[in-house]
Image (spheres, coloured by chain):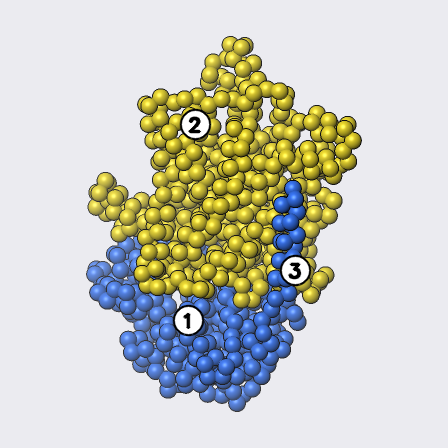
Chain colours: A yellow, B blue
Amino acid sequence: MAGIVVLTATIPLLFVIYSSMQLSASKWAGLWSSRLPELLGNTLSLAVVVAMLCLILAVPSAWLTARREFVGRKLAIWLLVLPLTIPTYVFAHIYTVLLEPNGWLGQIWQAIAGKGAVIDIYGLGGAASMLALATFSYVFLLSYTSLIDSRRSLEDAARIHGASKWQVFQRVTLPLMRPALAAGLIVVVLHALSDFGAVSMLRYQTFTLSIYLQMSGRFDYQAAAGLSLILVTMSLGFLVLERFFRRQQRYYAGAQTRFVARKQATAGETLMIWGWLGTVALFAFIIPLCWMLAWSYEALVQDLIDSKFWGYTFNTGLVSFTAATVGVMVALPIGLFHTRMRSWLSTTYVQLSSIGFVLPGPVVALGVIAFVIAVMPNLYGGFAVLIMALVVRFLPLAIQSQESALSQLTPSVEQAGRIHGAGPLENLRRVILPMIRNGMITAWVLVFIDVLKELPATLMLRPVGFDTLPIRIWIEASEEMLELAAPAALMLVLGTLPALWIMMRSHAVRR
Amino acid sequence: MKAKNMLALLVGAATLLVSSFSWAADELVIYSGRKDKFVEPVVEKFTEQTGIKVLLHSGKSTALLNKMQIEGARTQADLYLSNDAGNLQKGAEFGLFQPLAESLVKDIPAGLRGTDNSWVGLSARARVLVASKNAKDLDWAKSVFDLADPRLKGRLAITHSANESYIAGVTVYMESAGEAKTKQWLEGMKANVDGSVFNKHSKIVNAIATGQKDIGLVNHYYIYRHLAKDANAPIEIRLPDQDGMGVAWNVAGVAVSKHSKKQALAQKFIAFVVSEQGQKIFAEVNSEYPALPGVAAAAEVPAAGSYKVADVPMVKLGQKRDATIDLIEAVGMP
């Protein structure tokens, strides 16, 4: 079952490999000489810096919100998760505009640092910051979930043995958080490796750029495929690294123990906590939101929001909902298989299904088109093909989110179910699924959000006449039609809220 | 769980339903690499006059060509529209287009059409210099090749080298001035910008208007777009190389897909868009030059025929494109 899913997920990879094989040796040499080493270096540095920034933003925030009770705690959690509703290219667009000398932030900075001073957002620093702001919520979410779900017994045991609070954090809490951190960081890194929109806007030239160059400059999807192969190898490298950090470890405690309680924060502490969380939220969500509201108001005033707009909204919702549902259903067999078996085969399955994520959208799209036209041409041009490509593209998200939940599943409960005579399917339905429900919901929401924002694959594969909000943003924003792009971006934020609410609620149910 | 089952069933049904939806048999589908906003006026007028509905499927020009290539006979495109002659010529070379009848396109100059009329140009854009009115020591910059002059270090604004207009421009220069000179020019510009390039032409014009840069290389209409928003901006157009090779042109055009099932309808669209009326609507919305001689461009742009244009047929933009990209990559332009 898992095998079939993985096979489908590898279609783009097979396409890439097949196309790469049609490249001659001289062309490979040509690829190497044209700035490839520089681009590789750029991409790797970007991935590393983004990962570090995300850790800095997410881990303290997760710990503060999971372990301290303070006024507005729930609000803070929301604010830290909401940045997920904003695509990376929108972040980049907004901040370049705001940091210009006559933008809101540019003017503030000039007041502080003197006339003529400009914060230069272009380059590695700016690109990394934008990507970090856009993706740290993944790390935050997964860390928060892990901290909330962790059991007291392990930490109590450490305290009994005389460990100080910091030592407990360092030697018990943090290692227990490792699967969540690893899963979150892998998502962040894969995003950084495959991002093009934000990164090119900020003029930091990564690997994905060279792939786009081949496809848009030379119509050479074979060369693009060759380069994609290298990108895939890079990401596999990261994935292997992640596995290495997680190998052989089981992260569950006994089922009888209590959860870690939250400590009440004093007034002073609350102030400091909000100082930190507030600053993060300000840059990651509040400023972009204000910009979107301001320009959407303009659009409203100019009467630009019409029935077509609501059509795009509906389309976007439909695609995201379907892709997320199918994606989660499809990821489950792989996740279960891996948690249970932990064999090289299951690990390979997981790695292979992560391919879709790092392949640039257009490459995935071309692969799926080629496959569908060759094998089931009647399906081509319809909705189903788009869903297929999106599921392939975002499968790793679903798998990673489910995995950290699955890895906390205790075997004894599962076995208990089997002992009592439940067949495998019933066991799945009545024992396993309820226990990992939170993980599945998180997975669904994360895929939903990413599909909501997806652009390049949708651009290539959407049925004719079926536009989504990101496509409209791309079309309008590229011509500086901010009044038209902002409402679409705002709609994305609003559209994601219910999904996020579902996910947050599932945590509140626990305690 | 029951709710979940229902949901899954509903989704499955919806997916099946939606995958079978398609457009009406008498609707034309255009794969368009040109922004909707600039195609809709002419499309609306066409539908108004003929009753034929048109669906615009927007995307990046080259991605759409790749898509058409892989789709083959199953393509849904009836027409392909692009802002770059290079793309159109490439599409013709891949055998994606149905040659148009000579009678249909004879009024468009031959230099603006594809070989055996596989595509036809609709409107032209000029590659010009935009200069700051306030900058000192800039009057000497009259040629595109002057942009390589070390006096412009840190003052030059160009796009990144993957931009299709940029590539088209370089192709024209290679054809007119030769590879060696163009290579020198690229290297000079590379030194002048020191890794810092713009990803959009509109940002170049902005930078010049706010004084961050002094001179840039853009398509002419960006200047007029900016002036339309801010008439007092201290920017001016400079038509380069008037005593030399002339200004480089590129042309936006359209082609009929070889596998379209609605050839007759598609040709009606072509007939409309090369007519005087269609030409005017198509070009004026973006201040471009209509390809049909005798149709005037917008009042504020320098009139066609009032300045020297480089004598390079548009098909060269496609034929020589790979060589251009090779050169750009060899120099290592950012």
Amino acid type at image mark 1: Phe
- In the rendering, at what x and y percent does residue A289 appear? 37, 47
The structure residue drawn at horizontal position 34% and vertical position 82%, both measured from the top left corner, is B296
- Dot label at residue B286: none
- In the rendering, at what x and y percent does residue B255 appear? 54, 77
- Whether labels 2 and 1 share one chain: no
Mark 1 and mark 3 in contact (Cβ < 8 Å)? no
Subunit of mark 1?
A: B
Taking depth in this image into account, of A25 and B89 the one nearest to the observer is: B89
**Label 3 crowd bin: few (<14), some (14–19), many (20+), radius 10 Å:** some
Q: Secondary structure at mark 2?
A: helix
- Whether labels 3 and 1 share one chain: yes
Q: Secondary structure at mark 1?
A: helix
- Dot label at residue A64: 2
Residue that badge 3 annotates: B16
Q: Secondary structure at mark 3?
A: helix
